């Protein structure tokens, strides 16, 4: 990588130049450098408000970049080892949807694991493509779904040779990595494209000690959530493309749904974060991995918790593990992950990423400190001492194999009625039910509601999971066909 190029931040430099000119604004945004909303300016700071600018000639235009944004995208592509990169300000959701909308249309098939993020299924609602779901295998001890088995992908490809693409999650929220290189080769041998939801892997391109990144594996597209582990502002992301993709067409697809008023606060954060990772990423993520290893070792000494890592690797469904992920199983404590999550927040003022039925995730990245990890370990130890109980009657899984009856688009737009969840067994769901985060649907449009799913939803509500996706904000009723 050429550091003499990667030490540039063209959007940031252009923004600072315009800032220093002290231009009189007769354009949007209407707060006019913060003068029109003093309370907001006091909250965010005058510099932030003055940097919140609109597209103008010196700053380029996100929808049709020809200068500084285009240069920033070229630098991002180089940094991530991609042929093309697109700066995204509608979140990684928009990057994921752009991938799917770029390679499929109505009635096209796409092979994917069922435990995808809701943004994937939302894209299928929009364009009418048909999902070929692969039910992920699970680790019974941890109660989590794993990566894509190569044999399962081969079977799906054999049964659906007309599929346009394969999509995989890599790494998962829990740090589980699939054999992405072999799956990519399999896809290409069959004339299919390989898409990667790499929302939790922005860091993989910047250290040889980490699992293989999507672009290194030869994937055709990858959605990279820079705001998660890369240090940029919330909602900022990057879409990467390999040399098989027509970049100009992908740009048109992005412009179907992404805002025409790209935030320069978000864009500059992407530009500066890319520069930081390109120049210092290896050093940064070596340190993050070391901190995560330290925390895992300390947590496992407490007893009953299980902070897992590369000892899980089996060469297939857990082909590799992202050592920066601090995922901890809580079931032997007799507590659901969401219960530990709530205790950490309410009793110890520690905000972790999420808790599900059996696990918690503390998200480590470039801004963490060892003293904060010591506080986390101490809190977990005290929670065990104060709240440990018998494991009886604990659910021990986070994924239920669905029965798919209709496509997401058919079900979402079908005539529907609302039913109490407890009386909905046997009906076909026409909306989502999910715990957020992590945003994997328990139910998606087109799936049959079963007694097992109803029991899971009720258990999740009882334990305090934040359920979303239904029209009913209380998630007491559900829309069915």
Image (spheres, rainbow, N blue to C red):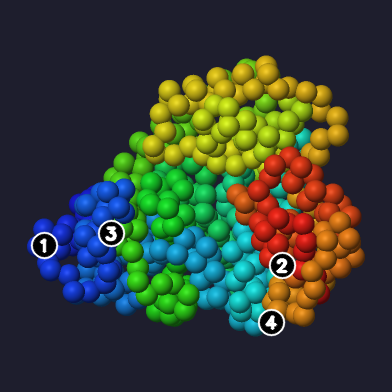
- The answer to whether residue 265 is above or below residue 335 is below
425 relative position to 16: left or right: right
Q: Residue at the location (15% across, 63% down)? A: 18
The residue where tag 1 is placed is 22
Q: Name the outermost residue toward the bottom.
A: 106
Real-space Cα separation, disc 4 to disc 3, in angstroms: 49 Å
Helix, strand or loop at label 3? It is loop
Query: Of the residues under marks 4 and 3, which one precedes in the sequence?
Result: 3
Real-space Cα separation, disc 2 to disc 1, in angstroms: 49 Å
The residue where tag 4 is placed is 107
* Percent coordinates x, y for residue 77 in the rendering: 36, 61
Real-space Cα separation, disc 1 to disc 4, in angstroms: 53 Å
Helix, strand or loop at label 1? It is loop
Q: Residue at the location (77% across, 80% down)? A: 415
Proximity of marks 4 and 2: CB atoms separated by less than 8 Å = no
Q: Residues within 10 Å of mark 2 (few under 14, many from 20)?
A: many
Residue 399 visible somewhere in the drawing: yes
The quarter holding residue 344 reads top right
């Amino acid at each position: 990588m050429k550091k003499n190029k990667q030490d540039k931040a063209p959007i940031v430099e252009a923004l600072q130049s315009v800032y220093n000119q002290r231009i009189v604004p007769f354009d949007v945004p209407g707060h006019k450098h913060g003068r029109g909303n003093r309370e907001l300016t006091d909250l965010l700071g005058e510099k932030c408000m003055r940097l919140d600018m609109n597209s103008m000639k010196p700053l380029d235009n996100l929808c049709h970049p020809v200068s500084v944004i285009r240069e920033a995208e070229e630098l991002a592509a180089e940094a991530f080892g991609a042929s093309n990169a697109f700066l995204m300000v509608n979140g990684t959701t928009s990057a994921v949807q752009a991938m799917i909308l770029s390679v499929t249309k109505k009635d096209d098939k796409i092979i994917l694991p069922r435990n995808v993020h809701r943004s994937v299924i939302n894209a299928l609602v929009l364009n009418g493509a048909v999902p070929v779901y692969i039910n992920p295998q699970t680790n019974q001890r941890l109660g989590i779904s794993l990566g894509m088995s190569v044999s399962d992908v081969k079977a799906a490809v054999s049964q659906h040779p007309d599929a346009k693409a394969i999509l995989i999650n890599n790494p998962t929220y829990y740090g589980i990595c699939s054999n992405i290189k072999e799956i990519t080769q399999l896809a290409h041998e069959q004339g299919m494209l390989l898409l990667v939801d790499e929302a939790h892997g922005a860091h993989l391109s910047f250290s040889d000690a980490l699992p293989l990144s999507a672009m290194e594996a030869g994937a055709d597209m990858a959605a990279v959530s820079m705001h998660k582990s890369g240090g940029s502002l919330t909602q900022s992301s990057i879409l990467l493309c390999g040399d098989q993709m027509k970049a100009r067409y992908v740009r048109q697809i992005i412009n179907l749904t992404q805002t025409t008023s790209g935030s320069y606060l978000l864009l500059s954060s992407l530009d500066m974060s890319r520069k930081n990772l390109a120049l210092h990423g290896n050093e940064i993520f070596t340190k993050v991995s070391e901190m995560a290893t330290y925390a895992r070792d300390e947590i496992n000494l407490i007893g009953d918790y299980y902070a897992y890592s590369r000892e899980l690797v089996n060469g297939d469904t857990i082909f590799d593990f992202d050592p920066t992920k601090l995922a901890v199983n809580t079931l032997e404590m007799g507590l659901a992950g969401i219960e530990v999550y709530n205790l950490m927040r309410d009793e110890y003022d520690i905000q972790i990423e999420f808790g599900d039925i059996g696990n918690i995730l503390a998200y480590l990245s470039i801004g963490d400190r060892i003293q904060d990890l010591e506080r986390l370990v101490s809190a977990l130890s005290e929670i065990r001492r104060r709240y440990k109980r018998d494991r009886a009657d604990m659910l021990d899984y986070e994924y239920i194999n669905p029965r798919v009856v209709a496509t997401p688009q058919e079900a979402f737009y079908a005539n529907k009625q609302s039913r109490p969840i407890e009386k909905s067994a046997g009906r076909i769901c026409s909306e989502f039910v999910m715990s957020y985060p992590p945003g994997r649907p328990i139910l998606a449009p087109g799936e049959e509601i079963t007694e097992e799913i109803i029991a899971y939803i009720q258990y999740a509500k009882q334990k305090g999971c934040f359920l979303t996706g239904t029209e009913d904000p209380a998630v007491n009723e559900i829309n069915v066909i």
